[in-house]
Amino acid sequence: MKNFSYHNPTRIEFGKGKEENIGEYISESGVSKVLIVYGSERIKHSGLFNKVAQSLTDKGIHFEELGGVQSNPLLSKVYEGIEIAKAKKLEAVLAVGGGSVLDSSKAIAAGATYEGDVWDFFTYKAVPEKALKIFDIMTLAATGSEMNNFAVVTKDETKEKFSLAGPATYPTVSVINPELQATVGNDYLAYSASDIFAHSLDMYLSATYLPEYIAGYVENILKTVMRTTEILLADKDNYEARSEFAWAATQALNFTTFCGIENNRYDTHFLEHTLSAEYNIAHGAGLSILMPAWMKWQKQFLPERFERFARVMFNKQDADAGIEALKNWYAKIGAPVTLSEGQIPEIDIPMLVDKLFAVAGMWGATQLYTKDMIRTVLQNAV
């Protein structure tokens, strides 16, 4: 393995009923005033919000609330949260929801301690060195945001979908109760599986050096996701499958799979963020469209890795057969695999090429993400 440094300060509280202890977890950090951030009113109808509120109240923790966070979270909602946090002098943000809610909460936490525009963090003009404390209760497994410091948000006016990350944006405590995730519909279960696959495969299929231990680790995550997704599509209340799926999602992007590797990239995520910002499709749906299309382009650089993927994951003997098998599996679980299935017109490809190339230019990555590369991948997804 190559040299690496690894530090993850997030504490995980995993299991049934753990959300009822959130007041205790927060009070242990000396916090007395929090902002609860959530998406739809579903958490109130289910009783989850009341459980959380009671747990906070029992520990003498005052709370404000901010609902209405949407999938593909918007910067305008982040601004709302920052205004509340500053006006009420809050000390922490508690996300109750999925990755979009937690990403918004991380941005709110960073922006509430910053004198400038929080968008500076997304355009790399500043790094969030300080933030309010961040806590979360996950109701959807997919992004791994509960154990990393990344947050992705879309700027409403420009449809730019960028990320922030800094030493202060790790959650302090993340609660993962798989039972809370049983209400997720089959469509978002499929999108979640696709997201976890992309977190794993972006690295696995691009790293120029991949230790055998890490390769096997990633393959086990992928096999677990495939097995448990199929179980959950048939039996949404299967707790064992739900719990393994949830933990696989966390492991896929808490960066343990990145230890000791070399020269990995995030190609499908780079490409997809523009799709979901432009068309407001689910992030995982965009990834299931792009992953096989990107693999067809990427296979030329690491043919042996692609052959291994085909053999280990699908018992296929060549790269193309492995790519086709993955595409078929996405379709089997109900995830889209073409631009048209994602309601993305083929006629828009030139516009998307220009937008993506402009983003690559902002990152100084136009030698890697050339217009030809971008066009080829998008055309492969037709």
Image (tube, rainbow, N blue to C red):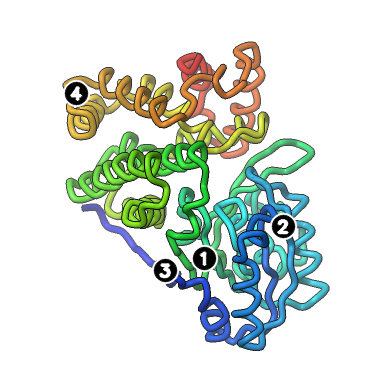
Q: Nearer the viewer, residue 252 or 208?
A: 252
Work out how far the residue at label 1 is from the one at label 3, CA to CA, in angstroms: 23 Å
Query: What's under tag 4, amino acid-wise?
Result: Lys
* Residue 77 in the image, given as x and y percentages of width and height: 75, 53
According to the image, label 4 marks what residue? 316
Q: Nearer the viewer, residue 55 or 338?
A: 55
Q: Earlier in the sequence, mark 3 or mark 2?
A: 3
- As drawn, the label of residue 16 is 3
According to the image, label 1 marks what residue? 170
- As drawn, the label of residue 118 is 2
* Residue 52 in the image, given as x and y percentages of width and height: 61, 73
The correct choice, above or below, for 266 with respect to 260 in the image is above
Query: What's under tag 3, amino acid-wise?
Result: Lys
Q: Nearer the viewer, residue 114 or 20?
A: 20
Query: What's under tag 2, amino acid-wise?
Result: Val
Q: Is residue 68 left or right of residue 331?
A: right
Front label number (2 vs 1): 1
* Local SS, label 2: loop
* Residue 41 in the image, given as x and y percentages of width and height: 70, 56
